Image (spheres, grey):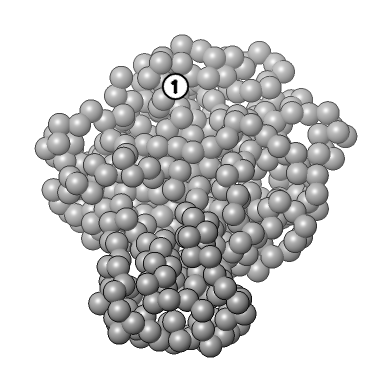
Amino acid sequence: MSLYLTHGFTAYSTKTELFDEIIHPQRVHWLPQTYQKAKTGFTYAPHILADMVLPPEKISWIRENPSIGKTAFILAGGNQHFAGINPRDNQKDTRLHYVYKFLPFTLTNVYAGRMAQQICEPDYISTDATACVSSLKVLQDCLMLEQFGYTRFVILSVEDAVTNSVLEFFGDSGACLTKKREEEEKIMPSAFDSVNGGFYVGQGAAFAVLMSEKEVAYYGLHPKARLVSACHSAEKLSNAIGQREDGKGYSDAIDGALTYGQVHASEITIVKTHGTGTKSNNASEKAGLQRSLKDFVATSYKQKIGHTMGASGLLETLLLLDNLAYGVVPGIANRTEKDDVFLSEDCEAPDGLVLSVAAGMGNVYSAAIFEPVR
Amino acid sequence: MIADADFFRLFDACAVLAKTPNNPPIPAGSLDDLLPSLNVDSLDTIIIGMYMCDIFGVPEEVGKTMQVRSVGDLKAFLLANATVESIDVDKVIENLK
């Protein structure tokens, strides 16, 4: 069984701005309009971000053309920050401080229910909090639901990533690239590089609709890609925010996707990596990919749009599919060494299948295989 | 402090914000209108109440005690707890957009 990606919309920023007033000064990719009225308490930055991938003229088709079977709506929120206001109520003097007066809407599933009713006629509503793999992990849920008669899958992925609390936590843990690290180490965001590395946090959202083959045929749609397979896995490791250097978590997810989709490793020719560029992820992801695959080229988008966390897997996959429509696999920004695998330069897209992978805090890994419709 | 017609305009503007485009509210026409008859459910009532409390300057802790069934109940609650002396309805509606 497989599904087809018929609609895909994204919101993100390629520009960065330095936030000097926060506890760990750092650059972020953000969309200032999402914070325009945030201090009034009547707007909620992630909700406005979500609205940016849901323009009424684009989603009206979904409501006006009902599913031929059952419809599932999934909010891939990446975490349960929706449920907590207090973490944002620190550092009141920053541009990112806000409160939100409508407490029920900060409850993830209340927001999901509201959005589901607005976008489609749902037979199933769920939310996913599986950290940075969230939007890829739910693809496996879709494939499983197909076996229960679902023919349409509506996925909204957005996370409250650029906030005082997240930037403080990522700064504390040394996960992101702070101003201090940039100055001391003189590095820029990159991945799989011996000199540059690390990422900025980014605001981003993705919206996607997947349909069964029958539903695609019924409506005569031209999909962007076929979702061949997806697999989520856990890594055995005592440190819940660590990664094994041998890449076992990555390779378990990749091997699972290959097996479930009856795909041979040699059929995967293009990889959208998680690509945060941290030392631990560089080692783990590279080892996992090299263990499971043969000849491939790999890219990363986090250097261009930041780490959009729970939304990143699906958002970056949609960006890659857009690039592939022009026959290009983009190189990884700021590489200092020539590399034909973890691409230091753009390359012509080879024929074959696409693998998207993601990793998340809590020892979680997801992989999804796509066949682009070229 | 505020005529019924102006109150209905404010209520309708807040109700539109509370509802989704696919499930719009019914405009208020009487203080006796019960909120469910205007397609305003319990979640919508919280949102409308928060907006209206902000407009009337009702403190947040007081606003949270609001329990209303009709448009008239809402108006009575707001007037009993308002801290603003007058409201420029047109300006408020413009700012809500």
Locate residue A201: give its quadrant.
Answer: top right
Q: How many labels does the image show?
A: 1
The residue nearer to you, when weighing A13 against A250, is: A13
Locate residue A99: give its quadrant.
Answer: bottom right
Q: Give the residue at mark 1.
A: A323
- Under tag 1, what secondary structure? helix
Residue A124 visible (yes or no):
no
* x and y, in percent, of residue A217 in the image: 14, 34
Amino acid of disc 1: Asn
The residue nearer to you, when weighing A110 against A325, is: A110
* x and y, in percent, of residue A263 in the image: 33, 31
What's the residue at 31%, 40% (across, down)?
A57
What's the residue at 36%, 36% (across, down)?
A8
What's the residue at 71%, 37% (across, down)?
A17
The residue nearer to you, when weighing A340 against A272, is: A272
* x and y, in percent, of residue B77 in the image: 48, 86
The chain holding disc 1 is: A
- In the picture, measured across the screen, residue A294 lies left or right of residue A85, that is left
Image position of A255 with respect to A23: above or below: above
Image position of A350 with respect to A115: above or below: above
- In the picture, measured across the screen, residue A351 lies left or right of residue A27, that is left
Image position of B27 with respect to A96: above or below: below
* x and y, in percent, of residue B83 in the image: 62, 80
Label 1 CA crowd tier, 10 Å (few <14, some 14–19, many 20+): some
* Residue farthest right in this picture: A184
- In the picture, measured across the screen, residue A87 lies left or right of residue A323, that is right
Q: Quadrant of the C terminus of chain A?
A: top left
The residue nearer to you, when weighing A64 against A26, is: A64
Residue A332 visible (yes or no):
yes
What's the residue at 36%, 48% (across, down)?
A155
Q: In which quarter of the image is the N terminus of chain A?
A: top left
